[in-house]
């Protein structure tokens, strides 16, 4: 597709379970971001991948959170032993880096996670 | 460290009146500055950006923003607001590629 694709769009899980959220960025975009948006809150930066460089993980809230990006394309955000405070919409975005398009992020529709 | 402040949680404006959403930032050097909008139940969309050059930047849907280096501000403006402009607006400065979003400002435009 032409846009950023995220799956699942909705996920309900029980406390303590692991979840995986997937992001398919726009083809050719070298940068990929994960953000979290909690109810009534702003956008919280989680992690940033740029090309083959080591990812910027400075926003991950705990060691229960991890993310990988395979082949410079698809990314998976994994949350282990989910807690109720993990409930949020997880947004993925991709962008070109360098040139006129630098920094303009294209967002997916998000994955809404509800931890019961 | 970089930071961004959107001092107003909500801005209320009557349709047809001018709209301003404030943003100040703290980023060393020469930042790139962005505005994004989130319409209800939809993803975030790019509105406009400042990289260099003219301090007044024009973007989508009739919005514009003015970069003021001395005041480290990048306020978003629209001369005549529409009800359809009701949404959540985010300011985002960056220098190293990682956009750090402000808390967002809810804009409510009443008919």
Image: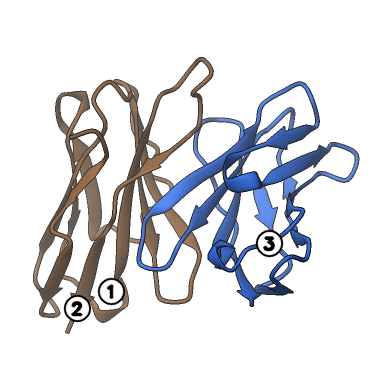
Chain colours: A brown, B blue
For mark 3, what is the residue?
B81
Chain that bears disc 1: A
For mark 1, what is the residue?
A87
Q: Quadrant of residue A85?
A: bottom left
Quote the CA–CA distance across marks 1 and 2: 5 Å
Marks 3, 2 in one chain: no
Q: Secondary structure at mark 2?
A: strand
Tag 3 and tag 2, C-beta contact below 8 Å: no
Q: Secondary structure at mark 3?
A: loop
Q: Earlier in the sequence, mark 1 or mark 2?
A: 1
Pick the quarter of the image with the N terminus of chain A.
top left
Residue A77: where, in percent of width, then height?
21, 50
Q: Quadrant of residue A111?
A: bottom left
User: Residue A46 vs residue B65: left or right?
Assistant: left
Nearer-the-camera pick, B86 or A18: B86
Marks 1, 2 in one chain: yes
Q: Which of pointers 3 and 2 indicates the residue nearer the eye? A: 3
Chain that bears disc 2: A
Which residue corresponds to the image point at 25% horizontal and 35% vertical from the top-left? A25
Q: Which of pointers 1 and 3 indicates the residue nearer the eye? A: 3
């Amino acid at each position: 597709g032409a846009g950023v694709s995220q799956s699942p769009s909705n996920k309900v899980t029980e406390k303590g379970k692991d979840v995986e959220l997937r992001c398919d960025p726009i083809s050719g975009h070298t940068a990929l971001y994960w953000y979290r948006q909690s109810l009534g809150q702003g956008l919280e930066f989680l992690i940033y991948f740029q090309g083959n460089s080591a990812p910027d993980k400075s926003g991950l809230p705990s060691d229960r959170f991890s993310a990988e990006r395979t082949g410079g394309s698809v990314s998976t955000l994994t949350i282990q032993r989910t807690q109720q405070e993990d409930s949020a919409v997880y947004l993925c975005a991709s962008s070109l880096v360098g040139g006129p398009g630098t920094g303009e992020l294209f967002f997916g529709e998000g994955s809404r996670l509800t931890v019961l | 460290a970089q930071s961004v402040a959107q001092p107003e949680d909500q801005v209320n404006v009557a349709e047809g009146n001018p709209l301003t959403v404030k943003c100040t930032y703290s980023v060393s050097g020469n930042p790139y500055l962005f505005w994004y909008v989130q319409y209800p139940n939809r993803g975030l969309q790019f509105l406009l950006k400042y990289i260099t050059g003219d301090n007044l930047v024009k973007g989508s849907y009739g919005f514009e923003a003015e970069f003021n280096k001395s005041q480290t501000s990048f306020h978003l403006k629209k001369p005549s607001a529409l009800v359809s402009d009701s949404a959540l607006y985010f300011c985002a400065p960056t220098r190293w590629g990682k956009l750090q979003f402000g808390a967002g400002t809810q804009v409510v435009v009443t008919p």
